[in-house]
Image (tube, rainbow, N blue to C red):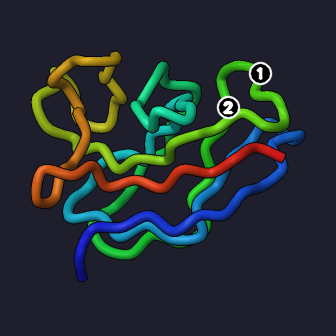
Amino acid sequence: MAPSVTAMDQSVANGVVSADSIMAPANGWMVVHRTDAEMKPGPVVGYAPLREGENTDVAAILQEDVAAGDMLMLMVHGEDGGMSTGVFEYTLGAKEDGPIRVDDKLVMQVITAQ
């Protein structure tokens, strides 16, 4: 199956954001970016590990406050290019543990915090 992210708008009052399911082409990360109407990935506010194949109910603990109405981009990142396996090393624009692309499109889903 093709890489994908399935998630819906949700409350983040408990400090967690989750995806219903993620299909990952390899071990990697679900990365939660801030975004807005321009739909460009912004700063990372959370992440969770993924294993190759289907992942269900993937939850990321938010590392900073997210308010109701904020838009979040749940994106699939790989585990390539970093110094350590199993350690999330990406920073915005970096190559380490960077985003997966299919046909030059990011694998992601945008949700709105409730």
- Residue 15 location, quadrant: top right
- Residue at 34%, 17% (x, y): give it: 91
Q: Does residue 15 sit above or below 84 in this rendering?
A: below
Residue 67: quadrant of the picture? top right
When asked about the image quadrant of residue 89, the answer is top left
Q: Are marks 1 and 2 in contact (CB under 8 Å)?
A: yes
Please state if 51 lies on the left or on the right of 49 as rendered.
left
What SS does tag 1 mark?
A: loop
**Label 2: how many Cα within 10 Å (few below 14, some 14–19, many 20+):** some
Badge 2 amino acid = Leu
Looking at the rendered structure, the kind of residue marked 1 is: Asp
Q: Is residue 105 above or below residue 32?
A: below
Circle 2 sits in a helix, a strand or a loop, which is it? loop
Identify residue for label 1. Answer: 65
In the picture, which quadrant includes the N terminus? bottom left
Image coords of residue 26 (percent x, y): 21, 60
Residue at image coords 79%, 37%: 69
Return the mark for residue 62.
Answer: 2
Horizontal placement of 108 versus 58: left or right? left
Residue 5 drawn at (x, y percent): 44, 64
